[in-house]
Image: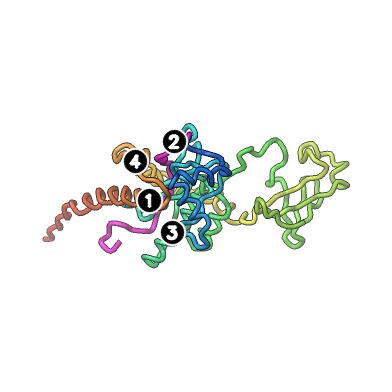
Amino acid sequence: MQTGLVKGEHMSVDGSFIQANADHHSRVPREQLAEVGQVNRTVREYLAELEQENPVEPPVPQQDQVSTTDPDSTYATKGGPARLGYYNNYLIDNSSCVIVGVQATPARLSHESLAARQMIERHQQRYGSGPRTLAADNTYGNGELLQWLDDRGITPYIRVKENPLGKGDLYGIEQFTYVPEHNCYLCPAGKQLKYVGINQRNRTHLYHATAKRCRGCSQKEQCTRGKYRVVQIHTCEAARQRAYALAKTPTFAIAQRARRKVEALFAELKNQIGLRRLRLRRMRFVREQFYLAATVQNLKRLVRFLSRKPSPEIATA
């Protein structure tokens, strides 16, 4: 950043699946690990790490079946048939296409948002400031990450992640009117839905009508298939609405075009560097391999930056 190569103002984040150095046939039920560990050193080390009170590595998400070759690898289906692998996460500077953050995670979509937070936090701790904007695909468009970015003054150019089942043919939330002084909603027929609490499972505020109010309603068929209507509002709905508004601005399209640079880096990683399949095993060694590959990619851009000829000064009369 001191030499001017990295601006650090506008960044993008993404993750890519990298196949593990293990075959999916090496998976065994978790209940058999103790038996396999008697003859397999890798499994013995894995089980010993699980028993540590303060493990060096954070625990990998529990799986019904674990690979005896690489117990840290995760069985996932992203980008093709189901395979064992990891996610390689990059945080890049849009202006220079330099990688400023690398994170190895289990191959779970939920870990991509966590990796984005950790990479931004490390960048802020090292340089004293974070990015002004962050671009990403809708995998990162959950309310928690959008709220986290808003709290830190980072503009998220990210599409909001929607319900995979779609809106359906019933009345959507836009058909209901919020009454802030009573903390309730009014349905299209003018009937009240009272606040009942928070659903901790999906992090939403719940507003319920009653069977009595909905029973004789002429619009019930368009509103609900149950006895009464329930409206669920995300706890980070304000951040989601701001992200919706940003998605309609011209700067959003510019940021999304710039985001393609991180996808180009993953293409370079796999097609030119050849890291489609890992050589090393276990999370701590996979992380090292990801860091080394990112260093190689950054060195290419550093050489290009240093080889630029300084622009000649324009002679003045």
Q: Nearer the viewer, mark 4 or mark 3?
A: 4
Q: What residue is disc 2 on?
A: 23
Q: What coloring was used for the rendering?
A: rainbow
Q: CA distance from mark 4 to mark 1?
A: 14 Å
Residue 258 position, x and y percent, is 39, 46
Label 2 sits on a secondary structure element that is loop
User: Tag 4: residue type?
Assistant: Leu
Check disc 3: other Cα within 10 Å, few if <14, some if 14-19, many if 20+: many
Check disc 1: other Cα within 10 Å, few if <14, some if 14-19, many if 20+: some
Residue 58 position, x and y percent, is 49, 56
Q: Earlier in the sequence, mark 4 or mark 3?
A: 3
For the view shown, which residue lies furthest in the front direction?
Answer: 38
Q: Nearer the viewer, residue 240 or 44?
A: 44
Label 3 sits on a secondary structure element that is helix
Q: CA distance from mark 3 to mark 1?
A: 22 Å
Residue 215 position, x and y percent, is 87, 42
Q: CA distance from mark 1 to mark 2?
A: 18 Å
User: Tag 2: residue type?
Assistant: Asp
Is residue 257 visible in the rendered image? The answer is yes
Q: Earlier in the sequence, mark 3 or mark 1?
A: 3
- The boundaries of the magenta stretch are 1-25
- Mark number, residue 120: 3
User: Tag 3: residue type?
Assistant: Ile
Horizontally, is 221 left or right of 198 in the view?
right
Q: CA distance from mark 2 to mark 3?
A: 33 Å
Q: CA distance from mark 2 to mark 4?
A: 17 Å
For the view shown, which residue lies furthest in the bottom direction?
Answer: 128
Q: What residue is disc 4 on?
A: 275
Q: What residue is disc 1 on?
A: 285
Q: Nearer the viewer, mark 2 or mark 4?
A: 2
